[in-house]
Image: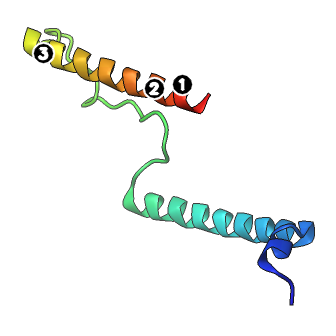
Amino acid sequence: MARPTQLMNDPNLLAAALEGLLLQKERLDEQIRQLREAMGKRSPGRPAKSASAAPSEGKPRKRRKMSAAARKRIAEAQKKRWSEYRKQQKAEG
């Protein structure tokens, strides 16, 4: 009997597995498309323009204001994330 590592290195087996998975993916994509169609939803992408989705021309939208404390918390959290990322990169390289 062949060992699992030998099976994973067999190009014919890998090609057959890939082909089978691609067929399954195509079937699933088609089923997803049919379900979305049945539900009345569009595929992913830019939504169609509609009268209700158009912004009103009367007044512009109000921008939400963020407090100085909130901006500071966000900035500190981002600095912490970048610091951890840099430490990780330094440790790897």
Q: Are marks 2 and 1 in contact (CB under 8 Å)?
A: yes
Q: Residues within 10 Å of mark 1 (few under 14, many from 20)?
A: few
Q: CA distance from mark 3 to mark 1?
A: 39 Å
Say the numbered circle drawn on residue 64: 3
Q: Secondary structure at mark 2?
A: helix
- Res. 67 visible in picture: no
What residue would you read off at disc 1? 90
Q: Is residue 61 left or right of residue 15?
A: left
Q: Are marks 3 and 2 in contact (CB under 8 Å)?
A: no
Mark sitting earlier along the chain (3/1):
3
Q: Residue at image x 12%, y 14%?
A: 66
Residue 38 or residue 1, whichever sits in front: 1
State the residue lying farthest toward the bottom.
1
Q: Secondary structure at mark 3?
A: loop
Residue 74 locus on image (x, y percent): 22, 20
Q: Quadrant of residue 87?
A: top left
Q: The residue under label 2 is which amino acid type?
A: Lys
